[in-house]
Image (cartoon, rainbow, N blue to C red):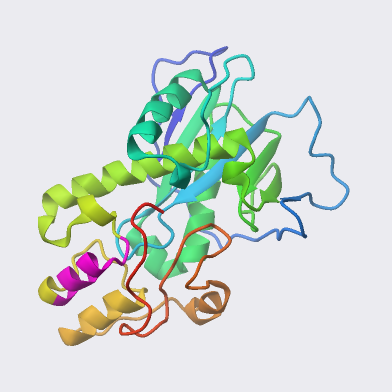
């Protein structure tokens, strides 16, 4: 799913929405010490740059898509109160969402589906959603600032910024758009599958969600590549296959907190460490 807003200088009659893009194995760009990590000798502070901020929501949950957003802010229309979406209340996020949509020069929200998460693994699916978000902008940026320590493969320069959702306003804005959009999507899933409590935990592995999995088994929107879901399928006598590179990814995702600021349960046994994942992440 992709939605974007055209720049104010070029008003369009409709906002384009694209639901599919070709999936390729994205590359990565690692941060090198500190919070801001430029690539080589590139100048990331040129006043001539058109900068978009990029962030994701939903990397750690057991169900639902992973959502990414890209935002190009208008320097002439400041938005007060931008911050990491996880540090804001739901009410504040909703209010800022409306301001970002109205005041930004361009924005795009995209996602990678549960099927893509299970096929590619969660890391590559996240990179794919980010790539879709940047490519869906109606105004082409010259620099993409990505929250975290990795960058997707893009046709424009990119910079990984660890903790960027609290440091770079455009990334904060992207964080808010991604989080609000995904929360709304999970509310829609809750209407279809109320037994799982998606309205309360947004798909994260809370005790409530794990209990529902044990009682009702997984639904079509659960991620089979995540250990608690695989275990739930196994109890029903249904085998599942994790992505080929899931083992390698599991070494990079710590249960405490990863570089994207989210908790993920990928290859841990169902009985260990599955509870206590915050639904507000």
Per the picture, the main secondary structure of the magenta-coloured stretch is helix
User: What quarter of the picture does the N terminus occupy?
Assistant: top left
| Residue 147 coordinates in the image, percent (x, y) | 60, 49
Q: Residue at x 70, y 46 (%)?
A: 158
Q: Nearer the viewer, residue 131 or 41?
A: 41
- Up the image or down, 169 lies above or below 191; here it is above
Give the residues drawn in magenta, as a range.
Answer: 204-214
Residue 70 showing in the rendered view: no
The quarter of the displayed image where residue 268 is located: bottom left
Q: Picture coordinates of residue 169 (x, y %)?
A: 60, 34
89 on left or right of 75 = left
Q: Residue at x 62, y 46 (%)?
A: 164
Q: Is residue 69 left or right of residue 225?
A: right
Q: In the image, 132: left or right of 152? A: left
What residue is rendered at 40% in x and 55% in y? 58
Q: For residue 46: magenta?
A: no
Location of residue 217 in the rendering, given as x and y in whole percent from the top left corner: 15, 73
The number of numbered badges drawn on the structure is: 0
- Which residue is situated farthest in the right direction here? 41
């Amino acid at each position: 799913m992709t939605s974007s807003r055209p720049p104010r200088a070029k008003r369009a009659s409709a906002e384009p929405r694209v639901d599919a893009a070709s999936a390729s194995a994205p590359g990565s760009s690692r941060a090198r010490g500190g919070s801001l990590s430029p690539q080589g000798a590139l100048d990331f502070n040129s006043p001539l740059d058109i900068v978009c901020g990029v962030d994701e929501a939903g990397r750690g949950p057991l169900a639902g898509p992973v959502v990414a957003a890209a935002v190009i802010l208008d320097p002439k229309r400041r938005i007060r109160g931008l911050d990491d979406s996880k540090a804001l209340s739901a009410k504040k996020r909703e209010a800022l969402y409306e301001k970002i949509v109205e005041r930004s020069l361009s924005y795009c929200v995209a996602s990678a589906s549960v099927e893509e998460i299970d096929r590619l693994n969660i890391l590559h699916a996240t990179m794919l959603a980010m790539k879709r978000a940047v490519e869906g902008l109606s105004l082409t940026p010259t620099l993409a600032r990505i929250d975290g320590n990795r960058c997707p493969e893009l046709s424009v320069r990119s910079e990984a910024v660890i903790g960027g959702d609290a440091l770079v306003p455009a990334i904060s804005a992207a964080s808010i758009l991604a989080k609000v959009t995904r929360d709304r999507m999970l509310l829609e899933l809750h209407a279809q599958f109320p037994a799982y409590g998606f309205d309360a935990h947004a798909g994260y592995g809370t005790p409530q969600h794990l209990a529902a999995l044990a009682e009702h088994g997984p639904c079509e929107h659960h991620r089979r590549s995540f250990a608690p879901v695989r275990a739930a399928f196994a109890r029903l006598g249904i085998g599942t296959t994790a992505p080929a590179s899931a083992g390698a990814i599991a070494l990079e995702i710590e249960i405490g907190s990863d570089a994207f600021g989210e908790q993920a349960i990928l290859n841990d046994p169902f009985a260990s460490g599955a509870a206590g994942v915050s639904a507000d992440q």
